[in-house]
Amino acid sequence: MKTTNDRRAQFDAECRSAGLTLGARDGDLLYDMWLDWLPERDRLRATVPEPEDEPWR
Amino acid sequence: MAVNVADLDLRGVSEGLGKRELSSVEATEAYLRRIATHDPVLRAYITVTGDAALAQAKDADAEIARGKRRGPLHGVPIALKDLIAVAGVKMTSGSQVLADHVPARDAFITRKLKDAGAVLLGKLAMHEWAFGRPVTDGPFPTGRNPWDVRRAPAGSSSGSAVAAAAGLCAGALGSDTGGSIRGPAAMTGLVGHKPTYGLVSRSGVLALSWSLDHVGPMTRGVWDSAVMLQAIAGADPDDTSTRNATTQDYVQHLEDGARGLRLGLLKRYYVDFPGLNDEVRGAALTAFDVLRKEGATIDDVDAPSLDLAMVVWAPIMSESYEYHAETLRKTPEKFRDGVRTRLLLSALFTAQDVQRAQRLRARIGREVDALLSRVDALIFPGQAAPALKFEDFPTTGFAPASIRYTAPWNLLGLPAVVVPCGFSREGLPVSIQIVGRRFDDATVLRIARAYERVTDWHRRRPDPARWTL
């Protein structure tokens, strides 16, 4: 189970990796939105495409 | 002039012009007076091009008087969302970034409308970059719902909805990336048509997310939307997505009715969704019974992968981040918080996230195409709930859950139309939605008309006496 501190650290690391430099206000707003989005992202990453799932087929 | 122009739908204005019961100048002046009277409260317009509109109207009257009516839009006053370019007219996209931007060229669809003889009344309010939230403050308020001015019309084509519903134009164009035509149309009692992807050019239309963006009509009636679509549909060399555009006659079969059509009701994903408002559910189910009585066969159908649609939509929307990233770095203060944050979230999607989303998008498309090989169209409620008060609009999150009613059909590029099917106890419009096969926009319009012609929801008008703050 990740703690709030763990989550914030993960978020900050992802921002650094993406090259985002944020002020405190944007950092907090984006963190809230990122937290909101995480369950959906987890579902996306947990859904394994089938071989026939190709966009240009 | 005996008619009250503001009470007419686009067809009424067009037929009045055709029968010479009304001139284009009279119609244009009537709309301009109504805009001057009511838009200080409703805030549908960002720019009103009154002088240019009157000049176009005079030209139209002169041409019509010579017996040369170009078609049903000739002389009809309409308005455009403020992300569609009109040469020499400010185009802001509801953003401070473009507050003084004046395009030099018409959008392809603007040229088509001018060729059809339409009169352009002005440019309409919208959510910032078609991605923001409803606001009543600042330089670009997004408009108030004419059915209850304490409520938002939703968006992002908010001004288009307000103007068409309040009789501040005969019809409007909006754009739709996740529901921005159909959402506000549903909230204001309009017909809103997101055409097939690739049927209507977006050259000269500001992008939000290019594989999801569509432009289409928002009007009081189905016929109105059909003739507007007829005018703007077709291939444009400057928009390669329209390379294979297959146009139809969108008016010819409007009165063919629903008899013999097979409709698939997406019950599990939409009707059974716990977030669906009970009044919307009830009105929609009653509307589907009307279609049954009109001779359609309706069976429950399902595409299980629709459950992935909202998981997929957000990463695809990262196209918008690519579009805005440079401006966002240079002038972040020119974006409102909500838009800036939503755009920045896209920076946190990985390449694998986006490509996986594309693969899952293909899966949803395959399943839905299979459904549409068995039925002529899919039907479901047009929205999750009636219009919200401004203060109740969600201020956090990437997208509200209600967007499931519209965004999947942007992912798939299928034609989708909402048509009003009743009112809530609080007097707010509700609607049904019809989705069809790619480039078969004529069938979704035919089904919408089959419902509309035996009901009278589309004839109700909001009361201007209530447009006060």
Image (cartoon, coloured by chain):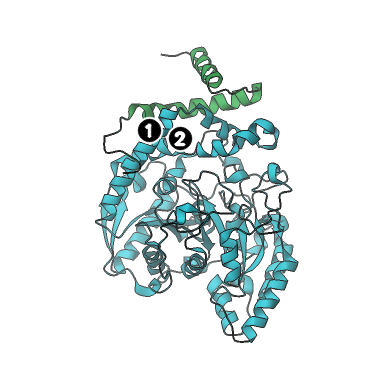
Placement of B268 over or under A32, stated as above or below: below
Q: Position of residue B214 (x, y in %)?
A: 49, 53
State the image quarter where residue B31 is shown. Answer: bottom right
Q: Residue at coordinates 65% horizontally, 44% vertically from top-left?
A: B135
Q: Colour of chain B?
A: cyan
Residue type at numbered disc 1: Arg
Question: What residue sits right under mark 2 in the picture?
Answer: B315
Q: Is residue B64 left or right of residue B345?
A: right
Q: Same chain, marks 1 and 2? A: yes
Q: Is residue B405 left or right of residue B185?
A: left
Placement of B303 over or under B12, stated as above or below: above
Q: Rounded to the nearest whole Å, what is the CA distance between mark 1 and mark 2?
A: 9 Å
* Label 2: which secondary element: helix
Tell which subunit mark 2 falls on. B
Residue B25 in view in this figure? no
Which callout, 1 or 2, points at the residue further toward the start of the chain? Answer: 2
Asked if the residue under mark 2 is in contact with the one under mark 1, i.e. CB atoms within 8 Å, the reply is: yes
State the image quarter where residue A25 is shown. Answer: top right
Q: Residue at coordinates 66% horizontally, 22% vertically from top-left?
A: A23
**Residue sitting farthest toward the front:** B237
Q: Position of residue B403 (x, y in %)?
A: 46, 44
Crowd around label 2: few <14 · some 14–19 · many ≥20 (10 Å)? many
**Residue sitting farthest toward the bottom:** B66
* Label 1: which secondary element: helix
Q: Residue at coordinates 65% horizontally, 77% vertically from top-left?
A: B60
Q: Residue at coordinates 32% horizontally, 30% vertically from top-left?
A: A47
Placement of B196 over or under B16, stated as above or below: above
Q: Position of residue B172 (x, y in %)?
A: 58, 62
**Towards the viewer: B436 or B285:** B436
Crowd around label 1: few <14 · some 14–19 · many ≥20 (10 Å)? many
Question: What residue sits right under mark 1 in the picture?
Answer: B356
Q: Colour of chain A?
A: green
